[in-house]
Image (tube, rainbow, N blue to C red):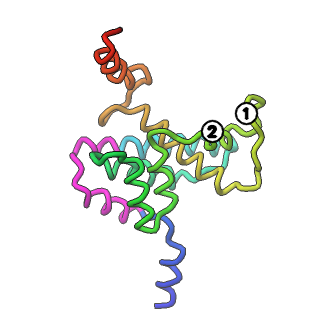
Amino acid sequence: DLAGAREAETHTRPGLNEAWTWLLQHLLSPEKISHCQLVAAGAFRLATALNRAGFKVDPDLALLGGLLHDVAHGLKEHDRQGRLMAEGMGWPEIGEIMGAHTEPPPEMLQIVFEGDPGWPSVDRTNDYLAGLYRACLSVYLADKLSLGDGPASLETRFEATRRRHCSMTGRL
């Protein structure tokens, strides 16, 4: 019991089987589940590439966040709702990713681009936070580079948004 309690105490993210179970419990469409798989794979690849380039990021966290990023899809403010759901499960890292996958806050970019002369200096002592933010941005980018359950260029990804905006404003 003590060992189980200690494990639960440090269990701040799901295992892969637990993540799949949670995803499937939310009865998303097969297309949305395929999209989540695609984003998870893309986020894992991005995080792995960041690691190879010398940036600290946990590819497994990016994979889990990508798999679960749209669990609350269909709810109003699904990014915020998903964050609250994940935090309620005791998974604050997954919640951070879910909350940032539609529009990451500017402070995430400051930490990721630390050292670039165009960005203000930030405190580099919090490597954990920097790694978490890089996982968040890996999921954000992987999500933006997919459309439905297939890969997409940024131009293709935002064409529907542009057309919708143009039809609302009457301009091309």
Density class for disc 2 (Cα within 10 Å; few <14, some 14-19, many ≥20) is: some
Residue 20: in magenta span: yes
Q: Is mark 2 on a helix, strand or loop?
A: helix
Density class for disc 1 (Cα within 10 Å; few <14, some 14-19, many ≥20) is: few
Q: Which mark is residue 34?
A: none
Provide the major secondary structure of the magenta segment. helix
Residue 17: in magenta span: yes
In this picture, residue 157 sits left or right of residue 121: left
Q: Residue at x 77, y 40 (%)?
A: 121
Closer-to-camera residue (167/21): 167
Mark 2 or mark 1: whose residue is earlier in sequence:
2
Residue 91 position within the rendered picture, expressed as x and y whole percent measured from the top left: 47, 64
In this picture, residue 43 sits left or right of residue 125: left
Q: Residue 119 carries which label?
A: 1
Q: In which quarter of the image is the C terminus?
A: top left
Residue 32 position within the rendered picture, expressed as x and y whole percent measured from the top left: 27, 43
- Dividing the picture into quadrants, the one containing residue 49 is top right
**Residue named by callout 2:** 109
Q: Which residue is drawn at 51% across and 53% down?
A: 96
Q: Residue at x 31, y 10 (%)?
A: 170
Q: Do the residues labelled 2 and 1 touch (CB within 8 Å)?
A: yes
Residue 55 position within the rendered picture, expressed as x and y whole percent measured from the top left: 67, 45
- Return the residue found at the far bottom: 1
The kind of residue tagged 1 is Trp
Q: Give the range drawn in magenta.
A: 16-36
The residues tagged by marks 2 and 1 sit, at their Cα atoms, a distance apart of: 9 Å
- Residue 23, above or below 152: below
- Total numbered labels placed on residues in the image: 2
The kind of residue tagged 2 is Leu
